[in-house]
Amino acid sequence: MHLSASRTLAAPPGAVFSFLADGRNHHKLTGRHISLLELCENRGSGLRGVMIIRGPLGIRRRAHTRIESSREPASIAGSARIGSRTTANVRWDLTEDVRGSTRVALRATLSSCSAFDRLLLSAGGAAWMRRVFANTLELLATYTEDLVDTTMWPPVLSNDPRESRRASA
């Protein structure tokens, strides 16, 4: 099963990547359904976290997360474990568009799933998690809009020098 959400942010990929790679920023992306309980970062094992996901009907799941690889400024990949049987590969993909903005895709692919989690996902949990992902990207947009270089705004897309003068006027 795949869960995903995507959004275009005004900030360039390098700025978005730097924000996501800094563990101190992760609590800013939690929203009302996720609580970050623990976050530790060390050179040997990278960034690890523990969070509580609060779903509808009082359902709560504890997730253990870990960043396993990154490729600046294009992607950050890791894993999430919920309980003893549910695991997912989680990935942030950052792609620059022609305006210098960043298309961000947040994806989770379940590699194993307990019967309980499979029931939750099929009973509406998958759609709910997609909304949580979209909310996470909304929060990311809020925090990264300050990272936009306004000296280059609006962006100049033409090689015609007359267009360049008009855009900077």
Image: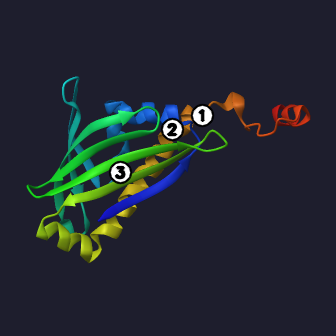
Q: Residue at x 87, y 37 (%)?
A: 163
Work out whether mark 1 precedes mark 3 in sequence or the reverse, and give the earlier one: 3
The quarter of the displayed image where residue 53 is located: bottom left
Q: Secondary structure at mark 1?
A: loop
Q: Nearer the viewer, mark 3 or mark 2?
A: 2
CA gap, disc 3 and disc 2: 16 Å
Tell me the element at label 2: helix
| Mark 1 closeness class: few <14, some 14–19, many ≥20 residues within 10 Å | some
Name the residue type under label 3. Gly
Q: Which residue is mark 3?
A: 31
Q: Are marks 2 and 1 in contact (CB under 8 Å)?
A: yes
Q: Which residue is mark 1?
A: 148
Q: Identify the mark at residue 34; answer none if there is no mark.
A: none
The amino acid on which the numbered mark 1 sits, given as a three-letter code, is Val
Q: What's the residue at 39%, 45% (across, down)?
A: 92
- Helix or strand or loop: what does disc 3 sit on? loop
Q: Which mark is residue 144?
A: 2
Q: Residue 23: where, in percent of width, then height?
A: 31, 32
